[in-house]
Image (cartoon, rainbow, N blue to C red):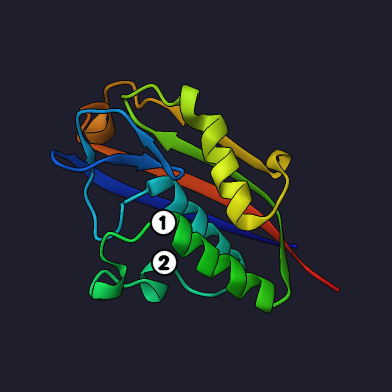
Amino acid sequence: MRTGIGYDIHKLGEGRKLILGGVTIPYSKGLLGHTDADVLIHAIIDSLLGAASLGDIGRHFPNTDPKWKDANSLDLLEVVYISLKNKGYKIENIDSVIIAEEPKLSPYVTKMITNITKVLGINERAINIKSKTNEKMDSMGRKESICAWATCCLSEEA
């Protein structure tokens, strides 16, 4: 068994859609970034890459490469998943948390899980997503940013 941890944070800004777990969430601001800035998917990608000792998201999808400009993060997750499969890894589970003061995310978690399991080809029981506020502390609590943490467990297929 191999475990990995991932983290991502992006500022909130005007003129962008808020996309988390591949779900467009109605909100007055969106996350700023080179891709769609989906912090949940980025944290999951980093946890998977870490568990497989394959570096991090920036190494695979650099923000200096125009190829990834405004990319759908679920597409990036699929690239990583294919790489893991080719190296003989199986995803056992993913646990994650999104930290955002607003909007309320619980109504969207089921759809996020569905999006992720479709890409990874795993059972929905293997994915857990929690949402928390930061109790009005720091940039997340001031509604300036959203972050996500993820952990995963991989096994090596025989």
**Disc on res. 55:** none
Residue 27: x, y in percent?
26, 28
Judged left or right of residue 132, residue 92 is right
Q: Residues within 10 Å of mark 2 (few under 14, many from 20)?
A: many
Q: Residue at x 51, y 69 (%)?
A: 79
Quick check: 83 above or below 34?
below
Residue highlighted by disc 1: 73
Choose top left, top right, bottom left or bottom right for residue 156: bottom right
Q: Residue at x 26, y 69 (%)?
A: 63
Residue highlighted by disc 2: 57
Residue 50 can be seen in this image: no
Disc number lying in front (1 or 2): 1
- The CA distance from mark 1 to mark 2 is 11 Å
Q: Residue at x 53, y 34 (%)?
A: 111
The tag earlier along the polypeptide, 1 or 2, is 2
Residue 20 can be seen in this image: yes
Residue type, mark 2 in image? Ile
Judged left or right of residue 92, residue 106 is left
Quick check: 108 above or below 89?
above
Residue 14: x, y in percent?
13, 38
Q: Residue at x 23, y 74 (%)?
A: 64
Q: Quadrant of the C terminus?
A: bottom right
Residue 32: x, y in percent?
21, 49
Judged left or right of residue 39, residue 110 is right
